Amino acid sequence: MKYSTLALTLASILSVGAASAATIYKSENGDNLKVYGGMEIGGTLVSDTDKTPFGPDSTYVDDSFMTLGAKGTTGDFYAKFELDAERQDWTKDNNIRLVVDKAYVGYKLASKQSIEFGRTDTAYDHYDAFGDVTNELGAGISEAGDQDNTLKYQGQFGNIKVGISHSLEGWDGKVDNNNKPQKYSYETDSLYGQVTNGYIGYFGDDFTILAGAESGDETEIYSLHSQVKLGDLTISGLVWDQTKNFNKDKNSEKNIVGANIGAKYKLTEKLSLLGSVNYEDLDNVKVSKEDYKSEWVVVGGEYKYAKNVKLAAEVSIGDVLKNGESGALGYVKAYYWF
């Protein structure tokens, strides 16, 4: 699943201090406590029932998501705690579970500069999807996401933005009899092992370009992202080279070289159309696993009913099923945040 569109929206709201969050307390000197949250309701339609967790019983996979958090500020210090309610697994039960997504403290070093420590987004996580106009069905990077014991710096100098973070070893999943992690048993993005990542970019009014990278015991990623605004038309894209393994096992290693180039056109103040072309070339180190290439297109639209309500629908056609098999996917969701 792509990193939550709702999570990205909420992060943007809080970073600029928008009034969308509800203020519970505010003192005369500016110290405050705010609560925020939202939900995504919807999911994915799969053309081949053999590729869903439910087999022939259903072509619809629910991917609803909810979040609730609080952020407090005292002087130059701030802290944040966030709970997510998300689907637990892709089985018939597909139960919802509660996960502590964020718990960290931060300090404002200067204007537009800060450091944070705790369970938080890594630096790269803020921009790994930059250049992707789709909400869900476009190709994307699988970076570290939220990590335990993370020290992060972010700063802005004119039009230049930079960020770097380092996360210590973290694991919240099950282990076997030898105390080794079991694959896919983790409840969050937290990787087993240390990971360092970051980004640097130029952010102009009509043109943006940035580079990102990640290195860790199980991951190595390099990416380039760009966006150009031409009136009501936005053209953007990203390319990347990503290598992953599980639990430092080189036999499980796989490399993906990918690209996602798209555009979004603003028809009205509330309605936008979008489309993208996507490509992935996957190579497995283990010769018994099949390599494959995938190509597909995504078309869709967004309707901004209000500043905190969005409706989205997308269709992808091409090599979108498991192991690069051809088929089609549909995606519908309603987003609400406060």
Image (cartoon, rainbow, N blue to C red):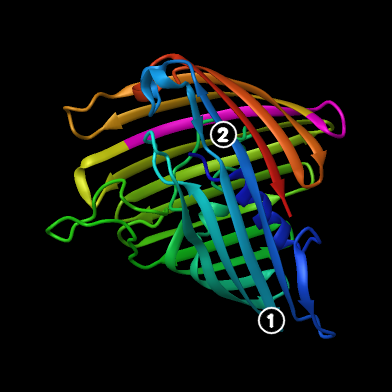
Q: Quadrant of residue 302?
A: top right
Q: Is residue 273 left or right of residue 96?
A: right
Q: Nearer the viewer, residue 263 or 317?
A: 317
Residue ID at (17%, 55%): 176
Confirm whether residue 137 shows in the render: no
Query: Which residue reaches farthest right?
Result: 269
Position of residue 210 measured from the top left corner of the image (x, y, whole percent) = 60, 47
Residue ID at (69%, 81%): 76
Q: In this view, does 309 lie to the left or right of 313?
A: right
Q: How far apart are marks 2 and 1 (CA)?
A: 36 Å
Q: Quadrant of residue 177?
A: bottom left
Dot label at residue 33 = none
Position of residue 8 measured from the top left corner of the image (x, y, whole percent) = 63, 50
Q: Is residue 337 above or below residue 327?
A: below
Instruction: Name the amino acid type tagged 1.
Output: Asp
Pointer 1 local density, CA inside 10 Å: few below 14, some 14–19, many at least 20: few
Q: Give the range drawn in magenta.
A: 255-271
Dot label at residue 136 = 2
Confirm whether residue 252 shows in the render: yes
Position of residue 230 measured from the top left corner of the image (x, y, whole percent) = 80, 32
Q: Mark 1 points at which residue?
A: 76
Of marks 2 and 1, the one in the foreground: 2
Instruction: Name the amino acid type tagged 2.
Output: Glu
Q: Which of 229 and 38 is in front in this view?
A: 38
Count numbered badges in the picture.
2
Q: Is the magenta stretch mostly helix, strand or loop?
A: strand
Sequence-wise first label, 2 or 1: 1
Q: Is residue 177 left or right of residue 82?
A: left
Residue 268 among those drawn in magenta: yes
Q: In this view, does 231 lie to the left or right of 186?
A: right
Q: Nearer the viewer, residue 8 or 306?
A: 306
Residue 308 among those drawn in magenta: no
